[in-house]
Image (cartoon, rainbow, N blue to C red):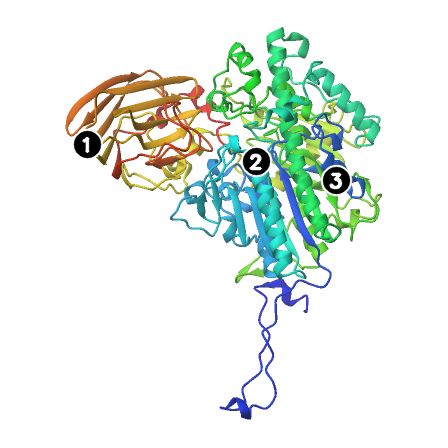
Amino acid sequence: MDARIREILPIPERKRSIPTSMDRKDQTGGFTPVAELRPPEGAPNVVVVLVDDMGFGASSAYGGPCEMPTAERLSEDGVRYNRFHVNALCSPTRQSLMTGRNHHSVGMGVTSEMATSAPGYTGFRPDSAATIAQTLSGNGYSTAAFGKWHQTPPREVNASGPFNRWPTGEGFDKFYGFMGAEMNHWYPQLYDGTTPVEPDRRPEDGYHLSEDLVDRAIDWVQLQKTLTPDKPFFSYVAFGATHAPFHVSPEWKKKYQGRFDAGWNAQREATLARQKDMGIVPESADLAPWASSVPQWDELDDTERRVACGFMETYAGFAEHTDAQVGRFVDALDELGELENTLFIYIMGDNGASGEGGIEGTTREHLVGHGFTDSTERMAEQLDSLGDASTYAIYPVGWALAMNTPYQWTKQVASHYGGTRNGIIMHWGGGIDAGGIRDQWHHVIDIAPTIFEAARVPLPVSVNGVAQQPVEGTSMLYTFNEPRAADRRRTQYFEMCGNRSIYHEGWTAVTRHGTPWEMVPQGLPSFDEDVWELYDTTTDWSQAHDLAADHPDKLRELQQLFLIEASKYNVFPLDDRVTERENPQLAGRLDLFGDRKSVTYRAGMGRFTEETAPNVKNRSHTITARIDIPDGGADGVIIAQGGRFGGWSLYVADGYLRYAYNCYGRDHYTVTSEERLGAGSHELRFRFRYDGGGLGKGGDVELSADGHSIGEGRVEHTTAYYFSFDETLNIGVDRGTPVTDEYAAVDNAFAGTLHSVRIDLDGEDLIEQESEADRQRRLLAHQ
C-alpha cells in the first residue's frame, strides 16, 4: 500500500468495482473483495513494558541491588541506554510516551488531578496528537493495554463517560487495568474496557495484581496469534509496581534479608562501583551531592535502621517479582515463536525513585500524604507484615536517593537527573544485530517515532479528520546497529511543579523550586528567586559539580534557551499552586458535581472515585437510606467510601446500625445504635455536624431510624484532603479493603433490600479557607 495514503487515518478505501448489470449472471468482470487492513510488509510486533517509580540505580541491569534477570536477559542481545529521560511525574511521562510529544504540548504539564485551564495543563490530550495505539491500529495492528493508565481526566472516570479518552477510546482494542495513580495489589478495583471488574480470587488464593496483568497479556497475545497469526500486535503493559503501596509475598522480600544493613550511603557507593564495572557510567563519574535535609545512615538509631532495612528489603522483592512477571511474558512470546519478531521496549521507571514516603518512610502512605510522620516504633512492630494487605508502604527518602544513584534528587524534581533519567532496554531479534550499551541522549517522546520507523509506518498528518501537530520526538532506530552514532537529539527542556532545566549539546542548566518530601514547606520562593546551577555533562556525568560561578555567560545562554523552549511548548505560565489546582472551580476546569449538594444512589451502584463522588470532607452532611430488613435480620454495608487506610462506612452489624470513620489508617472511630433494627422497612439517617474552624477537624454523629434518634457519638479527627487513591465509594458493599475490621473484606454486602441512599451536603466547602501551611500539604496528593 502506498505510504502516502497511510499518512491519513483511517486509511482511505480503494475504489471498488462498479456493477454493470442488474442480474449477477450478466455481470461483466469480477468484483474486488474489500482489502484486509495490514501494516507494511515486515512490520514487527511491539511490546512496551513500563515499571512505575523505579530509579536509575535500582535494577541489577543498571548496577543496582534489585535482581532483575529478565532485564539482564533482554539486554544481552539487545541495547541498553544510559542517557534516557522522562518527565519526573507519571501522567506527564505516560502522555508523552503515548503521543511522541512534550507533556505540555499535549496538556499534561502535571498529573491529571491537578489540571487547570492553561493550555499546557488542561489534562486533555488534544485530538491533534494521536497516540501510538491509534496510529498502529489505523495501520492494521491489534492493540491492547494492561495495567496503569492515569491519563484520563478524573471527572470522566465514571459510568457516564465520555469514553473517548479512556484507553479503548485512544486506539486500544482491549484494556484491562486501573485508571488512577496507584492501586492495591491484593484487592484491586479494575476495568475491563470501560466495565468495572474485580478479581475472582483473593490474596489467600495466591492473587497478585502484577501476575494478573501478565496473565491477561499472555492470554490476549496467544488469542491474537491463534486467530490472525500473520497480523502484528502492539501490547502495552504498565505495572502498578513499583509505585506505592509495596505489596509482595513474604518469600520475595525474605530473599533480601540483611542485604541492606550497611545502609543507603554504602549502597550508593556499591551501586556506582558496579555501574562503572558494567560500563553503565564512565570511570570519571562521581556521586552527586546528597540532599542536605536527609539524614546520613550513621545518623539513624538502631530502630530507624532496622525499619529502613525492612522497607528496602520489601521494595527489592517487589521489584524482582515485577521483573519475574515480565519474564513470563517474554517466555510466552518465545514459546509462540514471536520474540525475535517483536520490538520489546522495557522502560524501568516513568520518573525517578519516589521520595514521597518522607524521611522515616511509612506503612500508611495517605498519612504522610497529609503531612504527618509515621511512628518508627509502630512501624518496627509491623516489619513482618510489610508487603501484605495490612500495610500500604513506601520507603524512606534515603532509599529513593540511593535508588537514583549516581544522580541527585528524586521523582518530581525535573531539574536534576535523579528525577528524569531512567533505564531502558530494547530487544529486537530481527532489527538489532549489535547489542551493548548506547550512550546517545534520548527522551521518552522519542519512543513513538522509534516504533513507527520500526513498523515502517509514516507519521500521520490527519487522524479522524483532524490535522496532526508535529511529533516532537526523534527516532532512536539509528542507534540500534550503530553504537557510536552521533546524537540526533541536541536540546530538551524539563519542567515539573516549578522545577525546571534545559539540556543542550551536553550542558544542563537547572533550578530546583521545591523539595518533594517537605510536605509543609515554609513557603515557596518566587520563580525569580530560584537559584540556577550549571553542569557540563560531557565531563561531569552525574551533575556533581556546579559550574554556574565559573561560566556565567554559558548559564545565561541556557536560561534564555529555556525561555524559548518553554514558550514554544506551552510551559508558561509556571504554576506552583496546590489548593487552586485541586479545586476545580478555582483551577478553572470542569467539575462533575459543580454546585450540586444532593445525590441519590440506587442499590448496586458503585466504583465512584473521589473525583466523581460528593465531597463530604470538612463539612456537615447527612446520609439517608431506605432499606428493608427480612425476618431474622440482615447485616452488611449500606454505603462506604475508602478502605483500610482511610474512609468511612455506614453498615449493620449484629442488627445494630453502625458508623465507622477511619482517619488515615491511624484514628478509628465507631458509633453504634442503642437498639437493634427490627424486621420491616426503615428510613435510616446518619447526620454529621462538623466542628469547623479549619480542615480535618472533628464532629458529632447522630444515628436515627424512622424519625427518632437511636445513637450518638463523636469523631475527633477527620480526613482533610482525600481518603484514598485506589478505593472508591460503593452502595450496598465495601469493595477493596474494608474501612473497618468489623466486617470482612469483599464479603460484606448488605443482606437485606436496599432501595436508595441519598447524600446531602450542608454549608460551604471549607477547602477554600485553608491556611498557607495547609495548602502545601496537598502537593503530593496525586503523584
Label at residue 679: 1
User: Where is the N terminus found, in terms of image quarters?
Assistant: bottom right
Residue 783 appearing in the image: no
Please, what is the three-letter code of the amino acid marked with disc 1? Answer: Ala
Q: Nearer the viewer, mark 2 or mark 1?
A: 1
Category of crowding for the residue at label 1, using alpha-carbon neighbours closer than 10 angstroms: few (below 14), some (14–19), many (at least 20): some
Tell me the distance, in whole angstroms, between the alpha carbons under discs 2 and 1.
45 Å
Q: Which residue corresponds to the image point at 38% horizontal and 32% vertical from the top-left?
A: 734
Q: 544 or 425: nearer the eye?
A: 425
Label at residue 441: 3
Which of disc 1 and disc 3 is earlier in sequence?
Answer: 3
Residue 742 percent across, percent down from the top left: 36, 23
- What residue sits right under mark 2 in the picture? 240
Q: Nearer the viewer, mark 3 or mark 2?
A: 2
Do labels 3 and 1 touch, CB within 8 Å? no
Q: Which residue corresponds to the image point at 29% horizontal and 38% vertical from the top-left?
A: 595
Do labels 2 and 1 touch, CB within 8 Å? no
Please, what is the three-letter code of the amino acid marked with disc 2? Answer: Gly
Residue 200 placement, left or right of 699: right
Give the SS element for disc 3. loop
